């Protein structure tokens, strides 16, 4: 009779594994719990409320580390502001924010929160003119921990922010956004904001006009400033012609500025860029109201002293039913992607006006684009308009004036909606005028041409062939 060996009840532990005693969360030291709590910071602003209701110990750990855990009291439309501020510790900074609320904050709630001036760190409000008037009265004291200020109102009715706003200073402010709100004391206010990184002043009404000279002087005190946006609501934003910058004066330096955005009259931008140097600039975007003449010598000089001539390798012309724009791009340091350096936009509707405006600008830019090899032309938003009906209104010389700026151009893309119009302009470049425009062009990218476009482009192709400067046409699937 066979006997089976009894199995040993002692299991062998795999070699190399270490066993640890079972640990409950209550036995973890405070510093370990704090590290765990730190992971919750990426969750919604009131993530910590659930933790402090677990037990007294957790409550103590959370409340003892408000800076480490980035704790804040967010006051929005769903917050009983007075009750909230009375319950939680005064060490918590207050964030007043209705940007993500479906309902606006009531004026009473806003005022209740703003009265804690020594605790408010961020303000994000879209206000009626009546609430803004009350805010003008309440926010007279300094707000020492305020880092973000974003105020929006109707530019047609917003009252002017008083000189006593924030007691005239905000030493820790990093982000300033004013939309539709006039603030005439801004030139005195900005120099006190030493930590400002971004300034956005948009939809400035006529009652909030500040001269380019005052703006440039105020910005010069902000050594950390990286981005500036200045936009006017109405075309009346033109500086006093008697106060234009002299031919010789010292410009202020904005050492950290990388992005400059503007919307308004070209004369204002001319005056502003004549007064500043921006050694770290990456992108400049200027959007101008429509006008008959665009005389922008100071802007062109600004481009010339900011980018080395020949830096731009690609340009883009874009037309739609509201605006026309020209973009200049350069390659990144790796030589791969194109990055936007300069973007000039003109606000106008008719294509003939758009072409005329860009022709004025392009007539002045050849010194800055000696090596530009690629031009892309786009047209969008004209679906209900027959562009072919406009070909008799857009003068061919204006198209040729645009093309004349790009003497080194080798590649050009033409959109379907403008194929016949541009082809008609190129017809004028006969053998005798082959050097007038696009002398180096060798690659032309077209959508599958209609019969009329094909007939219009053929004389140009034949003329280049006879002049020993052949152009290869590529059919593309462009929209």
Image: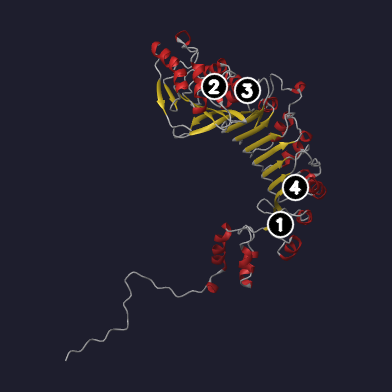
Mark toward the start of the polypeptide (3 vs 1): 1
Quick check: 40 above or below 231? below
Real-space Cα separation, disc 1 to disc 4, in angstroms: 13 Å
Quick check: 431 above or below 356? above
Residue with the mark numbered 3: 353
Mark in the foreground, 4 or 3:
3
Q: Is residue 318 left or right of residue 291?
A: left
Q: Nearer the viewer, residue 91 or 400?
A: 400
User: Which residue sits at x=53%, y=72%?
Assistant: 25
Mark toward the start of the polypeptide (4 vs 3): 4
Image coords of residue 440 (percent x, y) = 44, 17
Few, some or many residues within 10 Å of mark 2 (<14, 14–19, 20+): many
Element assignment for label 2 = helix
Single out the residue that lies furthest toward the bottom: 1
Image coords of residue 252 (percent x, y) = 67, 29
Q: Quadrant of the N terminus?
A: bottom left
Mark toward the start of the polypeptide (2 vs 1): 1
Image coords of residue 314 (percent x, y) = 49, 27
């Amino acid at each position: 009779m066979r006997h089976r060996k009894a199995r040993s009840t002692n299991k062998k532990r795999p070699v190399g594994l270490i066993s640890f005693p079972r640990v409950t969360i209550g036995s973890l030291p405070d510093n370990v719990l704090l590290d765990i709590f730190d992971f919750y910071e990426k969750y919604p602003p009131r993530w910590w409320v659930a933790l402090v209701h677990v037990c007294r110990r957790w409550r103590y750990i959370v409340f003892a580390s408000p800076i480490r855990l980035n704790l804040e009291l967010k006051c929005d439309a769903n917050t009983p502001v007075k009750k909230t501020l009375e319950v939680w510790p005064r060490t918590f900074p207050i964030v007043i924010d209705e940007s993500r609320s479906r309902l606006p904050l009531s004026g009473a709630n806003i005022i209740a929160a703003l009265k804690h001036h020594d605790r408010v760190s961020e303000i994000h409000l879209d206000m009626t003119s009546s609430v803004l008037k009350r805010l003008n009265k309440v926010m007279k004291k300094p707000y020492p921990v305020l880092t973000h200020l974003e105020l929006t109102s109707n530019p047609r009715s917003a009252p002017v922010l008083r000189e006593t706003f924030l007691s005239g200073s905000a030493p820790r402010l990093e982000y300033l956004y004013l939309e539709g709100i006039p603030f005439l004391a801004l030139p005195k206010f900005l120099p006190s904001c030493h930590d400002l990184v971004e300034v956005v002043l948009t939809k400035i009404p006529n009652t909030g006009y500040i001269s380019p000279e005052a703006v440039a002087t105020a910005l010069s005190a902000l050594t950390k400033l990286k981005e500036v946006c200045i936009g006017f609501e109405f075309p009346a934003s033109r500086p006093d012609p008697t106060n234009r910058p002299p031919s010789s004066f010292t410009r202020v330096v904005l050492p950290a500025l990388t992005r400059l955005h503007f919307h308004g009259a070209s004369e204002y931008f001319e005056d502003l860029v004549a007064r500043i140097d921006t050694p770290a600039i990456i992108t400049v975007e200027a959007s101008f109201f429509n006008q008959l003449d665009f005389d922008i010598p100071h802007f062109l000089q600004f481009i010339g002293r900011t980018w080395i001539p020949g830096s731009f390798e690609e340009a883009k012309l874009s037309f739609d039913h509201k605006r026309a724009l020209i973009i200049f791009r350069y390659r990144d340091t790796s030589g791969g992607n194109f990055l936007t350096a300069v973007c000039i936009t003109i606000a106008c509707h008719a294509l003939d006006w758009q072409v005329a405006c860009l022709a004025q600008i392009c007539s002045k830019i050849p010194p800055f684009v000696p090596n530009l090899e690629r031009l892309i032309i786009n047209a969008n938003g004209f679906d209900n308009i027959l562009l072919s009906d406009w070909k008799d209104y857009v003068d061919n010389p204006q198209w040729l004036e645009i093309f004349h700026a790009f003497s080194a151009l080798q590649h050009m893309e033409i959109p379907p909606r403008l194929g016949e119009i541009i082809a008609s302009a190129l017809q004028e470049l006969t053998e005798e005028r082959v050097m007038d425009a696009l002398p180096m062009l060798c690659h032309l990218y077209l959508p599958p041409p209609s019969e009329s476009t094909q007939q219009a482009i053929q004389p140009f192709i034949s003329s280049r062939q006879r002049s020993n400067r052949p152009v290869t046409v590529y059919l593309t699937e462009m929209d």
